[in-house]
Amino acid sequence: MFARRLRIERIDSAGAAHPCPIRWIDSFAMRNFTNDAIFDDTLPIADGLLEAGYRVPLDRLEAGMQDWFRRKNYIGPEERICVSEPA
């Protein structure tokens, strides 16, 4: 089920990447308010790291996390989230 390891980073206004704290990732993963079962296949494992199943689309995960992190005031309007699958 959790076949992929994903990197979750906050890109600051200068373009530097920083691993997102696990508490942020966990906040997103533990909420069941998306009404989208696709995000059920995620498991936070460490700062900047998330395991996910293959049915989790990275673009939707990135957009959902970015929206959630902004609403929680974890990131500012000039920052963004980058979700990637390390090679």
Image (spheres, rainbow, N blue to C red):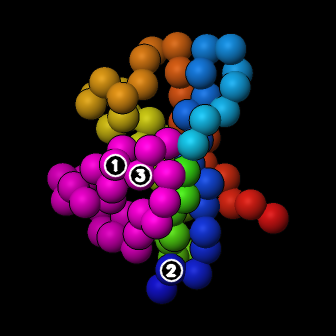
State the separation of the CA atoms marked 1 and 2: 19 Å
Total numbered labels: 3
Residue at coordinates 42% horizontally, 63% vertically from top-left? 44
Residue type (three-letter) at the residue carrying disc 1: Arg
Residue at coordinates 44% horizontally, 44% vertically from top-left? 21
Residue at coordinates 31% horizontally, 24% vertically from top-left? 73
In the picture of the structure, the residue carrying the numbered disc 1 is 23
Of the image marks 2 and 3, the number of the one nearer the N terminus: 2
Q: Is residue 35 magenta?
A: yes
- The nearer-to-camera label among 1 and 2 is 1
Residue at coordinates 57% horizontally, 43% vertically from top-left? 19
Of the image marks 1 and 2, the number of the one nearer the N terminus: 2
Label 3 secondary element: helix
The location of residue 53, given as percent across then percent down, is 51, 76
In the picture of the structure, the residue carrying the numbered disc 3 is 22
Q: Is residue 65 magenta?
A: no
The location of residue 58, given as percent across then percent down, is 57, 56
Residue type (three-letter) at the residue carrying disc 3: Ile
User: Relative to residue 2, is residue 35 depicted above or below?
Assistant: above
Q: Which residues are magenta?
A: 20-47
Outermost residue to the right: 87
Residue type (three-letter) at the residue carrying disc 2: Phe
State the separation of the CA atoms marked 2 and 3: 17 Å
Image quarter (top left, top right, bottom left or bottom right) of the C terminus:
bottom right
* Residue 28 visible to the viewer: no
Q: Are marks 1 and 3 in contact (CB under 8 Å)?
A: yes
In the picture of the structure, the residue carrying the numbered disc 2 is 2
Left or right placement of residue 36 versus residue 55 in this view: left
Q: Residues within 10 Å of mark 2 (few under 14, many from 20)?
A: some
Q: Residues within 10 Å of mark 1 (few under 14, many from 20)?
A: few
Q: Which mark is residue 1?
A: none
